[in-house]
Amino acid sequence: MQHRVATIGIAGTGFIGRGLARILSRQARWQVQRVLTRRPLDSCLEHPLPQTLTHSLEDFLDHSDLVVECSGDILHACRVVEAAFERGLPVVTMNAEFQVTAGSYFAGRGMLSEAQGDQPGGLADLHESALAMGFRPRVYANVKGFYDPNPTPENMAYWSRKQGISLPVVTAATDGTKIQFEQALVANGLGATILQAGLLGVAADDLESGALALATQAEDSSLPISDYIILPQAGLRVFIIARHQAAERAPLAYLKMGNGPYYILPQALNLTYMEIPKTITRILAGLPPLLNNSLHPSAGVAAVAKQALARGTLIQAGVGSFEVRGEALRIAEDPDHLPIGLLQGAVIRQAVEPGQRLHLDDVDLPDSLALRAWQATCAMAVASEQDRNP
Protein backbone atom coordinates (compact mmCIF):
# COMPACT_ATOMS: atom_id res chain seq x y z
CA MET A 1 0.00 0.00 0.00
CA GLN A 2 1.47 3.34 -1.04
CA HIS A 3 1.06 6.20 1.41
CA ARG A 4 0.22 9.70 0.25
CA VAL A 5 3.13 12.12 0.34
CA ALA A 6 2.43 14.92 2.83
CA THR A 7 3.11 18.50 1.81
CA ILE A 8 4.91 20.61 4.40
CA GLY A 9 4.63 24.38 4.22
CA ILE A 10 7.49 26.34 5.76
CA ALA A 11 6.88 29.89 6.99
CA GLY A 12 10.31 31.50 7.17
CA THR A 13 13.43 31.77 5.03
CA GLY A 14 16.10 32.33 7.68
CA PHE A 15 18.68 29.86 8.97
CA ILE A 16 16.02 27.46 10.33
CA GLY A 17 13.67 27.70 7.36
CA ARG A 18 16.39 27.20 4.76
CA GLY A 19 17.91 24.28 6.63
CA LEU A 20 14.54 22.57 7.06
CA ALA A 21 13.80 22.98 3.35
CA ARG A 22 17.08 21.23 2.53
CA ILE A 23 16.37 18.35 4.92
CA LEU A 24 12.79 17.80 3.74
CA SER A 25 13.73 17.98 0.05
CA ARG A 26 15.85 14.85 0.52
CA GLN A 27 13.06 12.74 2.04
CA ALA A 28 10.59 10.93 -0.20
CA ARG A 29 7.72 10.88 2.31
CA TRP A 30 7.37 14.69 2.29
CA GLN A 31 7.22 17.48 -0.24
CA VAL A 32 7.75 21.19 0.19
CA GLN A 33 5.60 22.92 -2.40
CA ARG A 34 5.45 26.38 -0.86
CA VAL A 35 7.67 28.45 1.42
CA LEU A 36 6.19 31.68 2.76
CA THR A 37 8.48 34.69 2.84
CA ARG A 38 8.12 38.46 3.17
CA ARG A 39 11.49 39.14 1.59
CA PRO A 40 11.75 40.21 -2.05
CA LEU A 41 11.87 36.96 -4.01
CA ASP A 42 14.96 38.02 -5.93
CA SER A 43 16.81 38.50 -2.61
CA CYS A 44 16.42 34.84 -1.61
CA LEU A 45 19.11 33.52 -3.92
CA GLU A 46 20.57 31.34 -1.17
CA HIS A 47 17.30 29.44 -0.65
CA PRO A 48 17.57 25.75 -1.67
CA LEU A 49 14.04 25.67 -3.16
CA PRO A 50 13.58 29.05 -4.84
CA GLN A 51 10.71 27.77 -7.00
CA THR A 52 8.59 27.27 -3.85
CA LEU A 53 8.81 30.84 -2.54
CA THR A 54 5.61 32.86 -2.27
CA HIS A 55 4.31 36.02 -0.67
CA SER A 56 0.72 34.77 -0.72
CA LEU A 57 -0.54 33.27 2.54
CA GLU A 58 -3.52 31.77 0.72
CA ASP A 59 -1.33 30.12 -1.90
CA PHE A 60 0.96 28.87 0.85
CA LEU A 61 -1.91 27.24 2.77
CA ASP A 62 -3.43 25.80 -0.40
CA HIS A 63 -0.26 23.72 -0.80
CA SER A 64 0.25 22.62 2.82
CA ASP A 65 -0.92 19.62 4.86
CA LEU A 66 1.08 20.84 7.85
CA VAL A 67 2.68 24.22 8.52
CA VAL A 68 6.06 24.76 10.16
CA GLU A 69 6.29 28.31 11.50
CA CYS A 70 9.90 29.38 12.00
CA SER A 71 9.91 33.00 10.87
CA GLY A 72 11.10 34.33 14.22
CA ASP A 73 8.53 37.14 13.98
CA ILE A 74 5.82 36.96 16.64
CA LEU A 75 3.24 39.20 14.97
CA HIS A 76 3.68 37.46 11.62
CA ALA A 77 3.51 34.04 13.27
CA CYS A 78 0.15 34.92 14.81
CA ARG A 79 -1.32 35.68 11.41
CA VAL A 80 0.08 32.48 9.91
CA VAL A 81 -1.15 30.26 12.75
CA GLU A 82 -4.59 31.90 12.76
CA ALA A 83 -4.99 31.31 9.02
CA ALA A 84 -3.70 27.73 9.27
CA PHE A 85 -6.17 26.91 12.03
CA GLU A 86 -9.01 28.37 9.98
CA ARG A 87 -8.09 25.71 7.40
CA GLY A 88 -7.85 22.99 10.06
CA LEU A 89 -4.11 22.56 9.48
CA PRO A 90 -1.72 21.47 12.25
CA VAL A 91 1.16 23.81 13.07
CA VAL A 92 4.65 22.99 14.31
CA THR A 93 6.73 25.92 15.54
CA MET A 94 10.34 26.61 16.34
CA ASN A 95 9.49 29.91 17.89
CA ALA A 96 9.52 30.04 21.70
CA GLU A 97 8.94 33.81 21.53
CA PHE A 98 5.64 33.27 19.70
CA GLN A 99 4.64 30.45 22.05
CA VAL A 100 5.15 32.45 25.25
CA THR A 101 3.54 35.61 23.89
CA ALA A 102 0.56 34.12 22.07
CA GLY A 103 0.70 30.32 22.15
CA SER A 104 -1.84 29.79 24.92
CA TYR A 105 -4.44 31.73 22.92
CA PHE A 106 -3.98 29.31 20.02
CA ALA A 107 -3.35 26.09 21.98
CA GLY A 108 -7.03 25.35 22.47
CA ARG A 109 -8.00 26.14 18.90
CA GLY A 110 -5.98 23.64 16.90
CA MET A 111 -3.00 21.31 16.85
CA LEU A 112 -0.01 23.40 17.92
CA SER A 113 3.36 22.01 18.96
CA GLU A 114 6.83 23.39 19.48
CA ALA A 115 9.41 21.26 17.68
CA GLN A 116 12.38 19.28 18.83
CA GLY A 117 15.69 20.83 17.91
CA ASP A 118 15.91 23.78 20.26
CA GLN A 119 16.18 23.75 24.05
CA PRO A 120 12.44 23.72 24.94
CA GLY A 121 11.72 20.86 22.55
CA GLY A 122 14.78 19.02 23.81
CA LEU A 123 13.60 19.32 27.41
CA ALA A 124 10.08 18.20 26.47
CA ASP A 125 11.49 15.13 24.75
CA LEU A 126 13.73 14.41 27.73
CA HIS A 127 10.73 14.89 30.03
CA GLU A 128 8.80 12.15 28.20
CA SER A 129 11.77 9.80 28.48
CA ALA A 130 12.23 10.59 32.19
CA LEU A 131 8.58 9.83 33.00
CA ALA A 132 8.69 6.61 31.00
CA MET A 133 11.65 5.47 33.15
CA GLY A 134 9.88 6.32 36.39
CA PHE A 135 11.86 9.46 37.22
CA ARG A 136 10.19 12.43 38.90
CA PRO A 137 11.61 15.67 37.44
CA ARG A 138 12.40 18.46 39.87
CA VAL A 139 14.38 20.83 37.63
CA TYR A 140 14.20 21.48 33.88
CA ALA A 141 17.52 23.13 33.17
CA ASN A 142 19.09 24.95 30.27
CA VAL A 143 22.83 25.52 29.89
CA LYS A 144 24.25 28.88 28.87
CA GLY A 145 27.92 29.34 28.10
CA PHE A 146 28.08 33.13 28.05
CA TYR A 147 25.89 36.00 29.23
CA ASP A 148 26.18 39.75 28.70
CA PRO A 149 22.95 41.65 29.49
CA ASN A 150 24.02 44.71 27.51
CA PRO A 151 26.35 43.77 24.63
CA THR A 152 27.69 46.40 22.25
CA PRO A 153 26.40 46.69 18.67
CA GLU A 154 29.96 46.32 17.37
CA ASN A 155 30.55 43.05 19.22
CA MET A 156 27.20 41.62 18.15
CA ALA A 157 27.83 42.60 14.52
CA TYR A 158 31.13 40.71 14.65
CA TRP A 159 29.52 37.53 15.98
CA SER A 160 26.63 37.85 13.56
CA ARG A 161 29.06 37.85 10.63
CA LYS A 162 31.23 35.11 12.12
CA GLN A 163 28.33 32.74 12.84
CA GLY A 164 26.21 33.57 9.81
CA ILE A 165 23.21 34.29 12.04
CA SER A 166 21.11 37.45 12.01
CA LEU A 167 22.07 40.30 14.32
CA PRO A 168 18.83 40.16 16.40
CA VAL A 169 19.18 36.40 16.95
CA VAL A 170 22.79 36.73 18.13
CA THR A 171 21.88 39.65 20.39
CA ALA A 172 18.89 37.87 21.95
CA ALA A 173 21.08 34.85 22.69
CA THR A 174 23.81 36.97 24.27
CA ASP A 175 21.68 39.28 26.42
CA GLY A 176 19.66 36.38 27.85
CA THR A 177 16.34 37.11 26.13
CA LYS A 178 16.36 33.80 24.28
CA ILE A 179 16.92 31.67 27.37
CA GLN A 180 14.29 33.60 29.32
CA PHE A 181 11.73 32.75 26.63
CA GLU A 182 12.87 29.14 26.48
CA GLN A 183 12.54 28.54 30.19
CA ALA A 184 9.21 30.39 30.40
CA LEU A 185 7.87 28.08 27.68
CA VAL A 186 9.21 25.03 29.50
CA ALA A 187 7.59 26.18 32.76
CA ASN A 188 4.24 26.76 31.08
CA GLY A 189 4.25 23.68 28.89
CA LEU A 190 5.57 21.13 31.39
CA GLY A 191 3.68 22.32 34.47
CA ALA A 192 6.72 23.78 36.22
CA THR A 193 7.34 27.19 37.77
CA ILE A 194 10.05 29.84 37.99
CA LEU A 195 11.35 30.92 41.36
CA GLN A 196 12.18 34.55 40.66
CA ALA A 197 12.03 37.19 37.97
CA GLY A 198 14.96 36.82 35.60
CA LEU A 199 15.52 33.22 36.78
CA LEU A 200 18.33 32.08 39.07
CA GLY A 201 20.94 31.55 36.36
CA VAL A 202 23.41 29.79 38.64
CA ALA A 203 27.06 30.29 37.67
CA ALA A 204 28.81 26.92 37.95
CA ASP A 205 32.31 25.49 37.64
CA ASP A 206 30.98 22.06 36.68
CA LEU A 207 27.69 20.37 35.89
CA GLU A 208 27.36 18.56 39.21
CA SER A 209 27.73 21.68 41.38
CA GLY A 210 25.35 23.66 39.17
CA ALA A 211 22.78 20.87 39.22
CA LEU A 212 23.00 20.54 43.00
CA ALA A 213 22.53 24.28 43.44
CA LEU A 214 19.34 24.22 41.35
CA ALA A 215 18.06 21.04 43.01
CA THR A 216 18.55 22.61 46.44
CA GLN A 217 16.60 25.69 45.34
CA ALA A 218 13.78 23.44 44.08
CA GLU A 219 13.42 21.64 47.43
CA ASP A 220 10.86 24.04 48.86
CA SER A 221 8.84 24.31 45.64
CA SER A 222 5.68 22.24 45.27
CA LEU A 223 6.23 22.27 41.50
CA PRO A 224 9.34 21.45 39.48
CA ILE A 225 11.32 24.55 38.54
CA SER A 226 12.49 25.81 35.15
CA ASP A 227 15.86 27.58 35.19
CA TYR A 228 19.42 27.50 33.85
CA ILE A 229 23.08 27.38 34.76
CA ILE A 230 25.97 29.35 33.27
CA LEU A 231 28.69 26.86 32.42
CA PRO A 232 31.36 27.89 29.90
CA GLN A 233 32.59 25.17 27.55
CA ALA A 234 29.68 22.92 28.50
CA GLY A 235 29.32 19.65 26.65
CA LEU A 236 25.54 19.56 26.88
CA ARG A 237 22.60 21.79 26.05
CA VAL A 238 19.83 20.83 28.51
CA PHE A 239 19.33 18.48 31.43
CA ILE A 240 16.73 17.35 33.92
CA ILE A 241 17.37 16.85 37.61
CA ALA A 242 15.08 14.15 38.91
CA ARG A 243 14.37 11.89 41.85
CA HIS A 244 13.40 8.22 41.78
CA GLN A 245 11.90 5.64 44.13
CA ALA A 246 14.11 4.55 47.02
CA ALA A 247 13.98 0.96 45.75
CA GLU A 248 15.85 2.06 42.60
CA ARG A 249 18.80 3.71 44.35
CA ALA A 250 21.03 0.65 44.33
CA PRO A 251 20.25 -0.26 40.68
CA LEU A 252 20.84 3.35 39.61
CA ALA A 253 24.17 3.39 41.43
CA TYR A 254 25.12 0.19 39.62
CA LEU A 255 24.15 1.90 36.34
CA LYS A 256 26.63 4.71 37.07
CA MET A 257 23.94 7.29 37.86
CA GLY A 258 25.36 8.09 41.29
CA ASN A 259 24.00 7.57 44.78
CA GLY A 260 21.08 9.98 44.55
CA PRO A 261 18.81 11.37 45.72
CA TYR A 262 19.19 13.60 42.65
CA TYR A 263 19.91 12.19 39.20
CA ILE A 264 21.08 14.21 36.21
CA LEU A 265 19.53 13.27 32.86
CA PRO A 266 21.53 15.14 30.18
CA GLN A 267 20.99 15.86 26.52
CA ALA A 268 24.03 16.98 24.57
CA LEU A 269 22.54 17.84 21.18
CA ASN A 270 20.06 20.39 19.89
CA LEU A 271 20.35 20.25 16.11
CA THR A 272 17.72 22.90 15.31
CA TYR A 273 16.13 22.31 11.88
CA MET A 274 17.53 18.78 11.56
CA GLU A 275 15.28 17.61 14.39
CA ILE A 276 12.05 19.29 13.27
CA PRO A 277 11.11 16.27 11.08
CA LYS A 278 10.81 14.17 14.25
CA THR A 279 8.04 16.45 15.48
CA ILE A 280 6.41 16.58 12.04
CA THR A 281 6.26 12.77 12.11
CA ARG A 282 4.73 12.85 15.59
CA ILE A 283 1.97 15.30 14.66
CA LEU A 284 1.08 13.64 11.35
CA ALA A 285 0.78 10.34 13.25
CA GLY A 286 -1.97 11.90 15.36
CA LEU A 287 0.01 12.01 18.61
CA PRO A 288 -0.41 14.82 21.17
CA PRO A 289 1.74 17.97 20.92
CA LEU A 290 5.28 17.61 22.19
CA LEU A 291 5.09 21.00 23.89
CA ASN A 292 3.16 24.23 23.74
CA ASN A 293 2.48 27.11 26.10
CA SER A 294 -0.59 25.29 27.53
CA LEU A 295 -3.99 26.58 28.57
CA HIS A 296 -2.66 27.26 32.07
CA PRO A 297 0.41 29.48 31.62
CA SER A 298 2.12 31.08 34.58
CA ALA A 299 5.25 32.72 33.10
CA GLY A 300 5.79 35.53 30.63
CA VAL A 301 8.78 37.54 29.45
CA ALA A 302 8.81 41.26 30.23
CA ALA A 303 10.77 44.02 28.52
CA VAL A 304 13.56 45.58 30.61
CA ALA A 305 15.34 48.72 29.41
CA LYS A 306 19.02 48.33 28.54
CA GLN A 307 19.44 52.09 28.26
CA ALA A 308 17.55 55.29 28.96
CA LEU A 309 14.59 55.58 26.58
CA ALA A 310 13.24 59.04 25.94
CA ARG A 311 9.60 59.84 25.37
CA GLY A 312 8.78 59.34 21.70
CA THR A 313 11.44 56.68 21.07
CA LEU A 314 10.32 54.25 18.37
CA ILE A 315 11.21 50.62 18.99
CA GLN A 316 11.08 48.71 15.73
CA ALA A 317 11.40 45.31 17.45
CA GLY A 318 12.16 44.41 21.05
CA VAL A 319 13.61 40.90 20.88
CA GLY A 320 17.27 41.12 19.92
CA SER A 321 17.39 44.92 20.12
CA PHE A 322 19.82 47.24 21.86
CA GLU A 323 17.01 49.11 23.64
CA VAL A 324 15.52 46.28 25.72
CA ARG A 325 16.10 42.70 26.83
CA GLY A 326 13.71 40.05 28.12
CA GLU A 327 13.17 38.92 31.70
CA ALA A 328 11.00 35.94 32.64
CA LEU A 329 8.52 36.52 35.45
CA ARG A 330 5.36 35.10 36.96
CA ILE A 331 2.50 36.82 35.14
CA ALA A 332 0.20 36.97 38.16
CA GLU A 333 2.82 38.91 40.13
CA ASP A 334 2.92 41.72 37.53
CA PRO A 335 0.06 41.28 35.03
CA ASP A 336 0.54 44.79 33.62
CA HIS A 337 4.15 44.16 32.51
CA LEU A 338 4.97 44.81 28.87
CA PRO A 339 5.75 41.55 27.06
CA ILE A 340 8.90 42.10 25.03
CA GLY A 341 7.34 40.03 22.25
CA LEU A 342 4.79 42.78 21.57
CA LEU A 343 7.41 45.49 21.02
CA GLN A 344 7.17 45.98 17.27
CA GLY A 345 6.56 49.49 16.06
CA ALA A 346 5.97 50.69 19.64
CA VAL A 347 6.50 54.26 20.82
CA ILE A 348 7.71 55.08 24.33
CA ARG A 349 5.04 57.16 26.02
CA GLN A 350 7.09 58.30 29.02
CA ALA A 351 10.79 58.30 29.84
CA VAL A 352 12.26 54.98 30.98
CA GLU A 353 15.42 54.49 33.03
CA PRO A 354 18.08 51.81 32.40
CA GLY A 355 17.18 48.58 34.19
CA GLN A 356 13.52 49.54 34.50
CA ARG A 357 10.88 46.92 33.72
CA LEU A 358 8.40 48.34 31.22
CA HIS A 359 4.63 48.21 31.64
CA LEU A 360 1.86 48.45 29.12
CA ASP A 361 1.11 52.07 30.01
CA ASP A 362 4.73 53.02 29.21
CA VAL A 363 4.20 52.57 25.46
CA ASP A 364 1.79 53.08 22.62
CA LEU A 365 1.37 49.70 20.92
CA PRO A 366 -0.20 49.21 17.51
CA ASP A 367 -3.24 46.96 17.57
CA SER A 368 -2.45 43.42 16.48
CA LEU A 369 -3.66 39.85 16.76
CA ALA A 370 -0.59 39.23 18.95
CA LEU A 371 -1.72 41.90 21.41
CA ARG A 372 -5.19 40.39 21.65
CA ALA A 373 -3.66 36.93 22.02
CA TRP A 374 -1.49 38.20 24.87
CA GLN A 375 -4.47 39.74 26.64
CA ALA A 376 -6.21 36.37 26.51
CA THR A 377 -3.04 34.62 27.70
CA CYS A 378 -2.66 37.01 30.62
CA ALA A 379 -6.27 36.42 31.64
CA MET A 380 -5.65 32.65 31.54
CA ALA A 381 -2.58 33.04 33.75
CA VAL A 382 -4.35 35.17 36.35
CA ALA A 383 -7.32 32.77 36.42
CA SER A 384 -5.01 29.76 36.79
CA GLU A 385 -3.22 31.45 39.71
CA GLN A 386 -6.53 32.17 41.41
CA ASP A 387 -7.57 28.53 40.99
CA ARG A 388 -4.29 27.39 42.58
CA ASN A 389 -4.58 29.91 45.42
CA PRO A 390 -8.31 30.55 46.01
Image (spheres, rainbow, N blue to C red):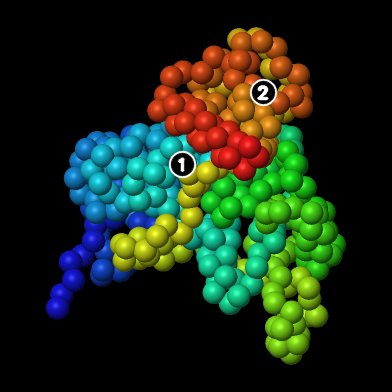
* Distance between the alpha carbons at the discs numbered 2 and 1: 22 Å
Q: Quadrant of residue 347?
A: top right
Q: Nearer the viewer, residue 286 or 358?
A: 286
Q: Answer with left or right where residue 304 lies relative to residue 188.
A: right
x%, y% of residue 353?
76, 19
* Crowd class of label 1 (few under 14; some 14 to 19; many from 20; radius 10 Å): many
The residue sitting at 61% across, 50% down in the picture is 187
The residue where tag 1 is placed is 103
Residue 9 point in image, percent of width and height: 29, 50
Label 2 sits on a secondary structure element that is loop
Q: Secondary structure at mark 1?
A: helix
Q: Quadrant of residue 2?
A: bottom left
| Residue drawn at the location 26% of the way across and 68% of the way down | 29
Residue 262 higher or lower than 79, as above or below: below
Give amino acid for label 1. Gly
For this orientation, the residue located farthest to the front is: 390
The answer to whether residue 166 is visible is: no
Q: Foreground residue, 52 or 126?
A: 126
Name the residue: 58% across, 77% down.
Answer: 133
User: Do residues under tags 2 and 1 come within 8 Å of each other at their CB atoms?
Assistant: no
What is the number of the mark on residue 280? none
Q: Position of residue 263 (x, y in %)?
A: 73, 72
Location of residue 358 with respect to 253 vertically, above or below = above
Inspect this view and state whether residue 231 appears. yes
Quarter of the figure that contains the C terminus: top right
**Does residue 161 appear to the left or right of 241 in the view shown?**
left
Q: Residue at x 35, y 51 (%)?
A: 111
Q: Amino acid at mark 2?
A: Leu
Can you say whether 244 is above or below 279 in the image? below
Would you name the residue on which mark 2 appears? 358
Residue 239 located left or right of residue 28: right
